[in-house]
Image (cartoon, rainbow, N blue to C red):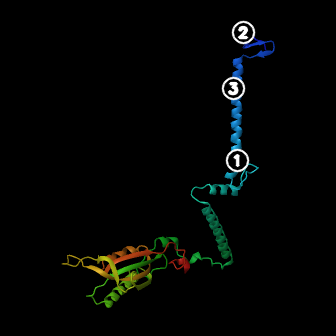
Amino acid sequence: VRASSVTRDPAGMTINGMVGKQLFLSPCSSRAQRRHSARAAAAVFFAIAALVALVAVLPSLHPSGFVSVQGTLSRGDVVAQHASHSVYYSNADVERLKARRKESRQELREWERRGLMGPKTVPVEYDKLPAIDDLYNRVYTGNADKDPVGGRKRYTYLVLFKLDPTSKGPEKLKALLVDYVRFFKTKMSCKDIKIKKKKSPIDGANVVTLEYPMKEYGPMARGQSVKQKQEKAIMFEIKITAPVQAGEYIAKKFYNDHMMLRFMVLGHTRRFGHANEDNELFL
């Protein structure tokens, strides 16, 4: 490379000039080159230091204590790594969940084994069942002896009757319960009717002491302005199997009864495929 022009400084050094094939640099250019070399060396040093620190920290992050040579982790390592880094579960919780999943898998295998070894059910003869249109368009007459099987749910009523010392006592209450049984069977198409007297859940007495004074249900008689408050009652448990629409009419009859203080209903049927349900497939 030949320079087009040569410039000399007062000291006689060549500045940015080239003679023949030799390159002569000025003192300023030498200092800039040294600074550039120092910066490059510092960058290389920091890169090496960062790489060493990464290699030192990486084994502690890995659950097995070493880095895979192939550069990829197996599925079990990935699952363990995510579980150990979860902020919601401790190590004890992770081990407990693993044990629970293992128990669940074993229980499932045991149930499947019992199902294969157990007795086989008899196939259902669908020809003997009513048509699907009859099931959806079914209308209950109210008489449980005449209405077909199917479509009823299990209910439990907890009823509080008032304790009236001026009435006839057990005879009047018995006649009232007999009337309810007749209403359930002949008007609401209910089956499996069971009525049982319950003791007080507080002290086990035959008479329930109310938490606060309650007034009876039913409309007030002619000339009556205020209903009397009751502090004691008798509790009965009524279990029935009734159509779904019957609950509205049963509640209406309860609200019109002067002997009734409170009632609560509990529904037990969730699926008709369970045993002891009112299902035509169980016939």
Q: Which residue is mark 1?
A: 56
Q: Nearer the viewer, residue 38 or 147?
A: 38
Secondary element at tag 3: helix
Q: Nearer the viewer, residue 254 or 212?
A: 212
Q: Identify the residue shown where x is 70% and y is 40%.
A: 49
Q: Does residue 141 appear in this view? A: no
Q: Identify the residue shown where x is 36% and y is 77%.
A: 263
Q: Earlier in the sequence, mark 1 or mark 2?
A: 2
**Residue 66 sits above or below residue 236 on the image:** above
Q: Which residue is mark 3?
A: 35
Q: Earlier in the sequence, mark 3 or mark 2?
A: 2
Please identify the residue farthest to the right as the structure is shown. 21
- Residue 37's label in the rendered image is none
Split into 4 quadrants, where in the image is the N terminus? top right
Q: Position of residue 134 (x, y in %)?
A: 49, 73
Q: Position of residue 7 (x, y in %)?
A: 72, 9
Amino acid residing under circle 2: Thr
Amino acid residing under circle 1: Ala
Q: Identify the residue shown where x is 56% and y is 57%.
A: 88
Q: Position of residue 264 (x, y in %)?
A: 39, 75
Q: Which residue is mark 2?
A: 7
